[in-house]
């Protein structure tokens, strides 16, 4: 008797690799759409361990745990790209009817920033200049970088970096500590990463776009947004960017970039690309993420289709909803104070957020410097009103941290 291929029928069980806040929001969306959800997470108290979810407890590179997730799923997707792709493929090979979306080839490219840079070049997408360092890089190589990138550069690990981790900023090549820079290079190489230097970009702002591509190649885009970083961590997002001085032609170009990337990778699901917008108006691709993304969290506001809804639709082979036309919006991350000495217990907010906004708390047990604990989203009728709302959200966060932490470092 023939075994039915679950990939050819309508999937009803979604497996998610990872148990953080992105997995939580994916699981919530999948449940609303009538799907059963299984999550593979390292611990039972992860944010994604919500009611109704089947939790597989284990490491994301544990062959047995991966196989258990696959056995409970029709389709498997992911909340982050830091995966052992080889072990994942081996586990899925034991369950040939289970589809991985996005595919492992997409994850392999996206988890390596050098592979991303080469992808951008291959599809004709502008990106900042870069140089790959040799494994035995020395002070002479740093001197050569200083001569090429006189205005400064950033050393980057090709893998394992996020939220500023895996980066070493060289603002003044003439004053760089060769010992510190080379130590950074060696640390990345010991972990199996290549190291490259990327030229500083004189940018006016950072922008990002989230897009979703379906199995049949249909692709829809959310608006281009402005992304504000604090210590290399996303602090807030507001938009649409065209309402805040970004030319409409830039948004059109960004859509074309995401379409090129998705076609080349035959991508299925939601993904994001972050860009630098240079002061002379050039759009330079910085990084891509093969998953739902922090810069798209504003889409959760109200009941309109979110990036999570569209991702679930795409990976399960359903028709894509059309992203709603949104008025002016802002999303602010609740980040652990950067002056915290380390991890500390944290209570959830008790005070309501500003009127007309929505608070999303990730239910993490403790907070550390720069750790994403939740976010607040809101809308307003004008760009000027968004400016006032940004101030109100910042004030709310300031009050929140001074009432929600069990302890603070001495001032």
Image (spheres, helix red, strand yellow):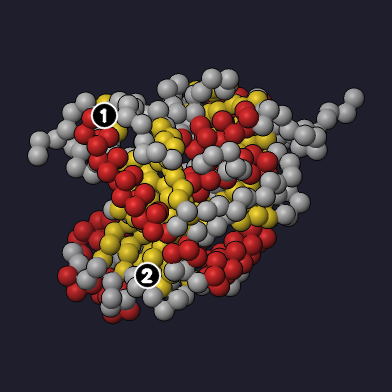
Q: Hey, which quadrant is residue 251 in on the image?
A: bottom right
Left-right relation of 374 to 139 = right
Of mark 1 and mark 2, the one earlier in the sequence is 2
Q: Quadrant of the C terminus?
A: top left
On residue 404, the disc is 1
Residue 59 visible, this orientation: no
Residue 388 visible, this orientation: yes
Tag 1 secondary structure: helix
On residue 204, the disc is 2
Q: Nearer the viewer, residue 366 or 361?
A: 361
Q: Position of residue 389 (x, y in %)?
A: 36, 49
Give the CA distance from mark 1 to mark 2.
35 Å
Q: Nearer the viewer, residue 253 or 304?
A: 304
Tag 2 secondary structure: strand
Seen at 41% across and 79% down, the residue is 280
Q: Nearer the viewer, residue 309 or 400?
A: 400
Q: Is residue 256 above or below residue 290?
A: below
Seen at 33% across and 44% down, the residue is 393
Residue farthest toward the right in the current orientation of the protein: 1
Q: Residues within 10 Å of mark 2 (few under 14, many from 20)?
A: some
Left-right relation of 202 to 301 = left
Q: Position of residue 112 (x, y in %)?
A: 48, 55
Q: Residues within 10 Å of mark 1 (few under 14, many from 20)?
A: some
Q: Are marks 1 and 2 in contact (CB under 8 Å)?
A: no
Residue farthest toward the left in the current orientation of the protein: 411
Number of numbered labels in the structure image: 2
On residue 348, the disc is none
Q: Position of residue 126 (x, y in %)?
A: 51, 72
């Amino acid at each position: 008797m023939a075994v039915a291929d679950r990939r050819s029928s309508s999937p009803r069980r979604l497996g998610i690799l990872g148990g953080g806040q992105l997995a939580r929001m994916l699981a919530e969306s999948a449940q609303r759409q009538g799907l059963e959800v299984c999550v593979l997470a390292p611990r039972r108290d992860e944010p994604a361990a919500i009611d109704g979810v089947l939790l597989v407890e284990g490491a994301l590179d544990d062959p047995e745990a991966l196989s258990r997730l696959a056995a409970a799923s029709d389709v498997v997707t992911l909340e982050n790209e830091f995966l052992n792709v080889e072990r994942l493929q081996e586990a899925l090979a034991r369950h040939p009817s289970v589809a991985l979306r996005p595919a492992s080839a997409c994850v392999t490219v996206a988890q390596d920033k050098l592979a991303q840079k080469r992808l951008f070049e291959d599809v004709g997408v502008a990106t900042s200049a870069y140089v790959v360092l040799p494994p035995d890089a020395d002070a002479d190589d740093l001197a050569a970088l200083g001569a090429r990138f006189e205005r400064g550069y950033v050393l980057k690990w090709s893998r394992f970096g996020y939220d500023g981790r895996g980066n070493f900023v060289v603002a003044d090549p003439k004053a760089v500590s060769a010992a510190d820079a080379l130590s950074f290079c060696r640390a990345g190489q010991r972990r199996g990463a290549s190291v490259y230097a990327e030229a500083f970009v004189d940018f006016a702002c950072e922008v990002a776009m989230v897009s979703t591509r379906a199995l049949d190649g249909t692709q829809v885009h959310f608006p281009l947004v402005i992304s504000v970083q604090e210590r290399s961590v996303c602090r807030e997002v507001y938009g649409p960017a065209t309402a805040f001085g970004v030319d409409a032609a830039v948004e059109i170009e960004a859509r074309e970039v995401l379409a090129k990337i998705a076609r080349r990778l035959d991508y299925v699901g939601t993904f994001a690309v972050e860009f630098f917008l240079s002061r002379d108006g050039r759009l330079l691709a910085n990084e891509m993420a093969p998953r739902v993304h922090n810069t798209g969290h504003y889409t959760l506001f109200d009941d309109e289709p979110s990036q999570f809804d569209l991702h679930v639709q795409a990976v399960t082979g359903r028709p894509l909803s059309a992203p709603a036309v949104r008025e002016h919006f802002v999303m602010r991350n609740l980040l652990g104070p950067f002056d915290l000495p380390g991890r500390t217990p944290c209570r959830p907010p008790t005070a309501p957020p500003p009127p007309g906004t929505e608070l999303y708390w990730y239910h993490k047990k403790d907070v550390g410097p720069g750790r994403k604990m939740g976010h607040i989203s809101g809308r307003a009728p004008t760009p000027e009103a968004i400016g006032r709302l940004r101030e109100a959200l910042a004030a709310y966060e300031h009050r929140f941290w001074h009432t929600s932490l069990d302890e603070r470092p001495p001032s």
